[in-house]
Amino acid sequence: MAKTALVAGVSGIVGSATAQLLLDQGWNVHGLARRATGQAGVQPVLADLQDAAASAAALAELQPDAVFITTWLRQDSEAENIRVNSAMVRNLLDGLPKPVGPRHVALVTGLKHYLGPFEAYGEGALPQTPFREDQGRLDVENFYYAQEDEVFAAAARDGFTWSVHRPHTVIGKAVGNAMNMGTTLSVYATICRETGRPFTFPGSAAQWNGLTDMTDARQLARQLLWAATTPAAANEDFNIVNGDVFRWSWMWGRIAAWFGIEPVPFDGNVRPLEQQMAGDDAIWRRIAERDGLVEPDLQRLASPWHTDADLGRPIEVVTDMSKCRRMGFSAYQPTDDAFIALFDQLRADRLIPPATGVTGEPG
């Protein structure tokens, strides 16, 4: 009999990739979101996890073998991040019927576990890189820790196993996502090509020159499924990245080449994308109308603030994956291939223009 999964946040980068992998592996997949996504094969569960009663009503008939929590909502302060996002995890796990058989719950957080929340991002005393799971928590308030605590409490009460997964910046497709570097860079490169604007690296010297890594959403999905089906992985936390390392001084040229533009090397000055792309909404709408793109709203595709946070870090950030490797997780994904696969998908789905654009007047 096929196993059943519930993916919370199925409309996001990680949730949609996880749902697709599960479907490909023969699982029955329920996808929880506030609005139906239309992802083929996914059975929609419509609920706002901020509403405990509505969540319980929507989840009342489900008995999933595995639950994948891939959702969060950004708030104006870390205190609000903690209040809202811990409540969402609590409402989900309280709303599900008590398991009648084995159940695994996987929570996706990220490297802010080691770097600190956005209010104190990369500040103060930080663990030595590469980040390792045994470095533990920082002595600061962090909504990732609050989410974990909700999972631990529910597991103790209901008897399910759990895993926590900490990706670096995730590469994948989603529209309306709050943290989406790949799509943000694709939109930025398209606008640079359209206007003749230089394709200027927006970040810091540490990111341009130092080593870093990233996480393809498909790689994260592989680890989520592995942890849910591997007894030795129960009740453990795991870092998850692609398995390679690179410098942005190299990757910037790879991205530029795909878009047919020239990369501008870092010259010692930080030029945040939030400033570079301010006022670009009308340019993007004109491109979208001319080339028949499906999303003319720049704000639903690009999240410059998040890309600036990642590329502006003053420290080198690399991640150790020895823990899951020792347990048998062996998947690998070159990061440049991950970017190229995303750009190909965005072009095929008409979220960015064809290679040379479409000639003619807008409209």
Image: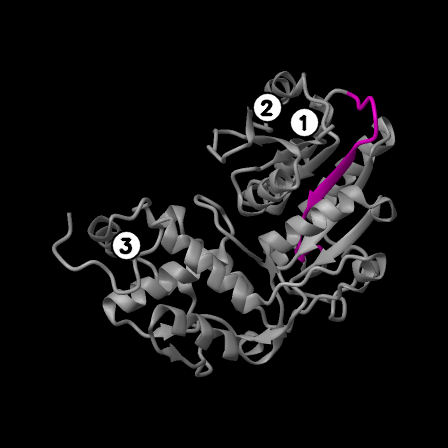
Q: Amino acid at mark 3?
A: Trp
Residue 110 falls inside the magenta stretch: yes
The residue that disc 2 covers is 51
Q: For mark 1, does the 10 Å Cα neighbourhood hold few (<14), some (14 to 19), or many (20 or more) residues?
A: many
Magenta stretch, residue numbers? 98-113
**Which disc number belongs to residue 91?**
1
Front-most of 323 and 208?
Answer: 323
Residue 103 location in percent, x, y?
A: 79, 32
**Which disc number belongs to residue 280?**
none
Q: Is residue 230 above or below residue 216?
A: above
Image quadrant in which the N terminus is located: top right
Query: In the shown orientation, is residue 292 left or right of residue 343?
Result: left
For discs 3 and 1, the disc positioned in front in the rendered view: 3
Q: Are marks 3 and 1 in contact (CB under 8 Å)?
A: no
Q: For mark 3, does the 10 Å Cα neighbourhood hold few (<14), some (14 to 19), or many (20 or more) residues?
A: many
| Point 70% across, 34% down: residue | 67
Spatial separation of the CA atoms under disc 3 and disc 1: 38 Å
**Which disc number belongs to residue 284?**
3
Residue 197 location in percent, x, y?
A: 28, 71
Q: Quick one: SS at disc 3?
A: helix
| Point 53% across, 68% down: residue | 336
Residue 109 location in percent, x, y?
A: 67, 49
Residue 356 location in percent, x, y?
A: 26, 65
Front-most of 299 and 340?
Answer: 340
Tell how many labels.
Answer: 3
| Point 42% across, 58% down: residue | 344
Q: Quadrant of residue 80?
A: top right
Q: Amino acid at mark 2?
A: Asp
Query: In the shown orientation, is residue 287 left or right of residue 88?
Result: left
